[in-house]
Image (cartoon, helix red, strand yellow):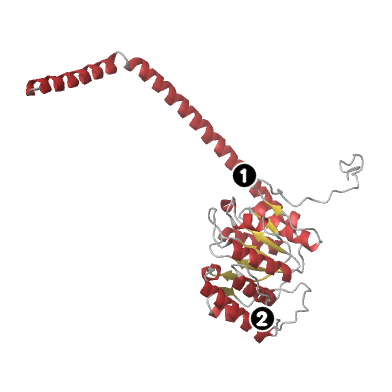
Amino acid sequence: MIDFRYHLVSIIAVFLALAVGLVVGSTALSGKAEETLTLLQRRAIASNNSLTKHNQELTNQVNADQAFAGASAQRLIGGLLAHDKVVLVVAPGANGAVTKGVATALQQAGATVTGEVDLQSSFLTTSAATETDLTTLAQSLARNAGLAPPVLSQSLASGQQAVAAVLAASLLDPTAGNSTLSANASADILTGLEQQGFVSVSGTPATATQAVLVAPGGAAPQTGGSVLVAVAAQLSAASSGTVMAGAVESIGTGSIINAENNSPHPISTVDNADTETGQIIVVQALKNLLDGRPPSKYGVDPGTAPSPAPTPSLTPTTGTSSPAAGRH
């Protein structure tokens, strides 16, 4: 049987070994270990300083590019949408810089922003009860306005699709003033949706010819993709051009713009519309649609075009050769 003295000796031996190890580690081994750690620390500090400097350089470059875009906006988009009317439809949680910046760019392009309709969070809910309520409301509003009953789909967002069709009819007319809806009928539709808490309307929007749908802000993934894709489709069908605009912060898989780009019938999208460059591109994208060009996706996310391609001039400047000549 092992007695208490054996345990005591064992415990003393363990602590003695620890003490010897600490002494050896803090003397004989500390110099080399400390030297290695110091070297690694210096390398980490140098790398961090280099990355900080590079990040600041990139920030300065972006700021300079955006300042240039802002200063050049009038030359780039002035008059592009002269006499056109555009309505803003804003999703819940949208980045305010996108909404405000796009409205300013549209005005610089000569367009009239007819109004703003803010979709409410309740509109994105796809519960059975909400779908039923929205479908019933859409049918009632259409009947009272003298519109054909909205076509009901089998999608999970069929109620939103029905309401979006009626909403689009109240806001848009691609024929520029030949709408079959009276101003009172359009106002009644907006009032009905607002009273049920599905939208919030700024002013009394006049009939527009084009639309900008402002996507939700925040990092991806985002909710409401199927609903907002359905809204985009109805706005596009009722207008001469619709663009979905979002912020750089929302780029990525699971974003609303990503969902739109992968939908069966995508509209034009701009994923950096919180910048001066992106806001200019929104205007140019609308102009391209007016000119009969197909929808496209623009911005900074991989797979997007940096901007609408300009039409090359085939007339060479006197004394120089045209780089565009001979291209097809």
Residue 238 screen position, x and y as percent: 72, 71
Residue that protrudes farthest toward the front in the picture: 1
Which mark is on residue 62?
1
Residue 190 screen position, x and y as percent: 61, 78
Question: Relative to 294, does residue 50 appear above or below in the rendering?
Answer: above
Residue 291 screen position, x and y as percent: 81, 61
Picture quarter with the N terminus: top left
Neighbours of disc 2 within 10 Å: few (<14), some (14-19), many (20+)? many
Q: How many marks?
A: 2
Horizontal relation, residue 308 to residue 66: left or right: right
Question: Relative to 240, does residue 266 appear above or below in the rendering?
Answer: above
Q: Real-space Cα distance between discs 1 and 2? A: 43 Å
CB atoms at circles 1 and 2 under 8 Å apart?
no
Horizontal relation, residue 188 to residue 296: left or right: left
Instruction: Say whether residue 79 is visible.
Output: no
At 63% from the left and 45% from the top, the residue drawn is: 64
Residue 230 screen position, x and y as percent: 64, 66
Q: Amino acid at mark 1?
A: Val
Instruction: Identify residue for label 2.
Output: 186
Residue that protrudes farthest toward the top in the picture: 28
Question: Which of these two is toward me, 113 or 209?
Answer: 209
Element on which disc 2 rests? helix
Q: Amino acid at mark 2?
A: Ser
Foreground label between 1 and 2: 2
